[in-house]
Amino acid sequence: MTATNSNPRQWKSLAAHAIDFDEPIHWGCSGRGWHCCTDKVIPVRPYEVIRLRHAMRQSGRDLLNSGLVTFVWDAAGTLVSYLRQVPYERTRKACVFYEEVTNIDARRIREEAPERFAGLPEQVQRAADSDARGEFRVAGLCNAHQHRPEACRGFPFQRDPARERNPEDASGLQVFRCGTCALSTPTTPRAVMLDNDLEEFWRADDAFLAVSRYLQSRGLARVVHADYRSLHLTDEQRTELWASMYVPEAVPEVIERFPEQWLAPMDLEGDREIYRLVLEALLDRVDALVAERGTGPADLGPRDRAPVSRPDLASMLDPARALLPVVRATEAA
């Protein structure tokens, strides 16, 4: 398994601005995926791969072997990943799960797959009845919609990355101004985020960040700097260690307790527990590696920082742990 050392530009091209979680806005998804599913790099983390197994009905190992994600070492020496992109139009890119539907496609789906047609958005069903001439775009669909990644669920909103420094005082961000938002339903960013089950993904995201910091603290980041004390590993060993978070089937307890669990259409409790087991197994490996090399935590990682304690993953992943700031008292009243 290999990883590049680059930094995707498309994601950086999105201009973000702060937005209060309870600010009144007009927003609604029009189902036109050519706004949000094209020309954007979509980050995925280990929990999201666990969820995508259900969409693809494949194990995590098979998903990685298929090239679904691309691994990249970021500037902090953390291994991150992005969904594969496919060619779109002449010079553009689209998410691997993106499916653009025209009026002609809508008629074909109605004839060949009536059950699927019944579950498609209203504008697709109307287009199948249209007598308009020619072929025109109707909708952009996601073939992994039920298990889509965090970035897709929240789009065009996301939590402020400043939470990594101060998680108790973080606002929201609007990362894109979708052209269909202004004429849509009155709502708030909080309502949009909660409606898309984002807190489950945020808890998983927080756990990933905590584990990443732990690995960085134990000299396992891919950093070449005089002030970073690295645990000696080959690049291949370091990549495999980080990438193991994306392969739940490599953990014996996961195989024993959740055999072929990815075949279930949905299993939130199972996915959450599998994720915890995978991260705990990685932390155990890290602790064993450090002990085996005879190097104490105080002698590893950034020279100017104290060692990071092992994270309490069970508490971090507890579904009762709320993440959005509480509604302001004046509004709650």
Image (cartoon, grey):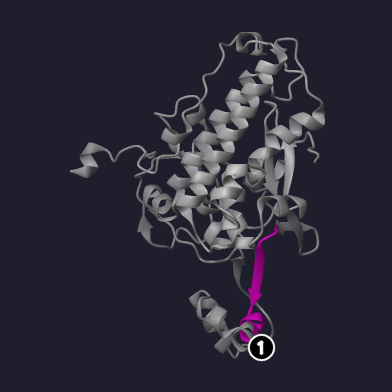
- Is 97 included in the stretch rendered in magenta? yes
Q: What are the residue bounds of the magenta stretch? A: 95-108
Judge left or right: residue 168 versus residue 51. Answer: left
- Tell me where residue 167 sits by quadrant: top left
239 relative to 176, above or below? above
Q: Residue furthest left?
A: 333
Q: Label 1: which residue?
A: 133
The x, y position of residue 186, in whole percent, is: 35, 58
Front residue of 246/125: it is 246
The amino acid beneath tag 1 is Arg
Residue 59 is at least partly visible in this image: yes
User: From the viewer's perspective, is residue 123 above or below residue 92?
Assistant: below
Q: Is residue 241 magenta?
A: no
Front residue of this view, candidates 121 and 231: 231
Q: Position of residue 106 (x, y in %)?
A: 61, 81
Number of residues whose C-alpha sits closer than 10 Å to that of mark 1, classed few (under 14), some (14–19) or many (20 or more): few
Question: In percent of the image, x 75 and y 10: which residue is there?
Answer: 226
